[in-house]
Each structure stands twice: as C-alpha cells, then as structure tokens.
Image: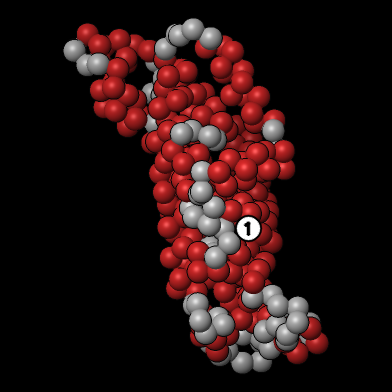
C-alpha cells in the first residue's frame, strides 16, 4: 500500500509539472506571436485608429490596404519587388550552401600545406564587421562594373565568402565517421563521389540550417542592397518598404503594415516548413544510432 501511495504521489507531481510546463509554453508562445497578430489586425485600421485609439480590434475588416499597398506608387508594383527579392535571394542561398559545403569538405577531410593558417584566416574574417569591408567591396565592385546588379551578392556566395556557414559545416563534417569515407574508397569511389553520394545525404540537416539562415539574412538585408543597387526597378522588398515611407506626404500606415506582413509571410512559412531540419542542423554533431 505504501508503495502504491508513493507512486500515486509521484505521478501527481509529474502531472502538475507537465501542466505547469505546458501552461508556460502556451503563454510564452502567445507572447511571441502577439506582434504578428497585432501587425495583421493593424492592416485593417486607419491612421486615426492606429494613432488615436488603443483598441486591439479594428472597427471594420476591409482589404483596401492590401490592394492599394500592392499597387504602390502606380509605376512599380510589389509584384516586381517580390520578383526582385526572390531573384536576389534564391541564387545566393544555393551558391552559399554549395560553396560552403565544398570548402568545409576540404578543411574537414584533407590535409594540405598551410591548412591551419588558412583556417585561422577563415575564422579571423568572422571578426570583421561589415562597416570595415563595405568600402573596399564597393570600390572593387565599382571597378568590375557590377553595381546596380545582383552580382555583388551572387559572386561572393559562389566563392564561399560566408565563413560562418563554412565553420558550421566543418563542425558537422567532423562528427561524421571517417570509416564511411574509407569504406567508400575501398569500393572504388573517388573523393567527389564520396562527397556527393555518401556525405551530402548525411548533411541534409546542416545544409538546410545553413540555407535557412542565409535566406533569412539575405531577405532582411537592407544595407547592402542600399549600397549596391541604384535602380528602383531592381529594389528588393526591404528597400521598397523603406521607400514607401515618404516624410513629405501623408503615409498610409495600414498599407505599409500590410506590405510588411506580406513580406514577412514567406519567412514564417519557410521556418515552419523547415523547422525540423533547422533544429537538427543546430543540435546534431554526429550520426544518430
């Protein structure tokens, strides 16, 4: 009887702990989602409601802000801005993942002269802030006549100029047993086949994580497009949203908020679709099982 009573007490305590944990997570989740909900509801409000009232719910639900906001100034619509953003971001993500994986494979699996020095230089570039390299990059791209195009974003990604992702993939490579490579070599595979057929399938979580990070950073980037892109027709969403804030006119904030919500939606959808790979890529340091 005493053992049963103790078991019942332990089960009750664990039950109460689980209820408390779930309650905390639900509250924290609502707290984190609240800005998105407020942003969505604010798209249906007028300027008078936004600045003259503290009501959470709008007086009416009309989609004029989305229609008028999408049209923009009438000359260039947000269809063009979304197209520009995807045209900029997708190649950068693909090139970054491809080049970072190849460079990480070389550092993690091969020995070559000056390897430690080159790896130290690679890690050292992580310490350089963007403000230090922005002027040399602008001068170089100006001489190459790459300004007002997406080449200043594509070419660095193609040649592995993002050491954070290289370092992340190197650490993942080091968690994969070298016996896999050796067994593949015995079966007649070369270094490229080992990389493509053996290691890349095992690296999907890390590659998805690096791609997701790069997608988020490039999508939200404001400074670099502002420096390297001059034509309004080539503006991504970050510059288009800023351009809509004309201090010399009456800003329709509901339209700005509506376009801000639409520009955030792809990031939210991508994160929820890829969160499994994202978490695995951050947490996994080797093979399971």
> Quadrant location of residue 95?
top left
Residue at x 49%, y 24% (from the top left corner): 170
Asked whether, in this view, residue 36 is left or right of residue 101, the answer is right
Quarter location, residue 263: bottom right
State the image coordinates of residue 1 (x, y, percent, origin top left): 60, 35
Residue 118 showing in the rendered view: yes
Against 26, residue 57 (above or below) is: below
Whole-percent x, y for residue 232 in the image: 55, 69
Identify the colour scheme used.
Answer: secondary structure
> Which is nearer the eye, 97 or 273?
97
At 56% from the left edge and 17% from the top edge, which residue is drawn? 118
Q: Residue 78 at what x, y percent from top left?
A: 50, 74
User: Disc 1 on helix, strand or loop?
Assistant: helix
Q: Nearer the viewer, residue 148 or 174?
A: 148
Which quadrant: the C terminus? top left
> Which class describes the residues within 10 Å of circle 1: few (<14), some (14-19), or many (20+)?
some
């Amino acid at each position: 009887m005493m053992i049963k009573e103790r078991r019942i007490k332990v089960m009750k305590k664990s039950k109460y702990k689980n209820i408390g944990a779930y309650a905390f997570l639900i509250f924290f989740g609502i707290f984190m989602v609240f800005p998105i909900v407020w942003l969505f509801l604010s798209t249906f409000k007028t300027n008078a409601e936004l600045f003259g009232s503290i009501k959470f719910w709008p007086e009416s639900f009309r989609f004029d802000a989305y229609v008028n906001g999408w049209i923009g100034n009438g000359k260039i619509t947000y269809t063009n801005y979304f197209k520009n953003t995807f045209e900029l971001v997708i190649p950068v993500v693909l090139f970054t993942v491809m080049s970072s994986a190849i460079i990480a494979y070389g550092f993690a699996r091969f020995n070559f002269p000056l390897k430690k020095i080159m790896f130290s230089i690679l890690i050292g570039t992580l310490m350089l802030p963007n403000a230090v390299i922005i002027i040399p990059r602008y001068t170089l791209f100006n001489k190459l006549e790459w300004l007002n195009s997406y080449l200043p974003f594509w070419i660095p990604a193609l040649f592995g100029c993002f050491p954070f992702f290289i370092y992340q993939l190197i650490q993942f490579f080091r968690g994969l047993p070298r016996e896999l490579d050796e067994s593949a070599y015995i079966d007649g595979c070369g270094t490229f086949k080992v990389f493509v057929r053996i290691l890349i399938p095992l690296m999907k979580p890390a590659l998805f994580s690096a791609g997701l990070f790069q997608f988020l950073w490039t999508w939200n980037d404001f400074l670099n497009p502002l420096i390297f892109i001059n034509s309004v027709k080539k503006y991504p969403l970050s510059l288009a949203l800023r351009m809509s804030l004309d201090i010399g006119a009456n800003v329709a904030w509901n339209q700005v908020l509506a376009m801000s919500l639409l520009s955030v939606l792809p990031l939210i959808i991508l994160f929820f679709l890829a969160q499994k790979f994202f978490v695995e890529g951050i947490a996994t340091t080797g093979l399971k099982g």
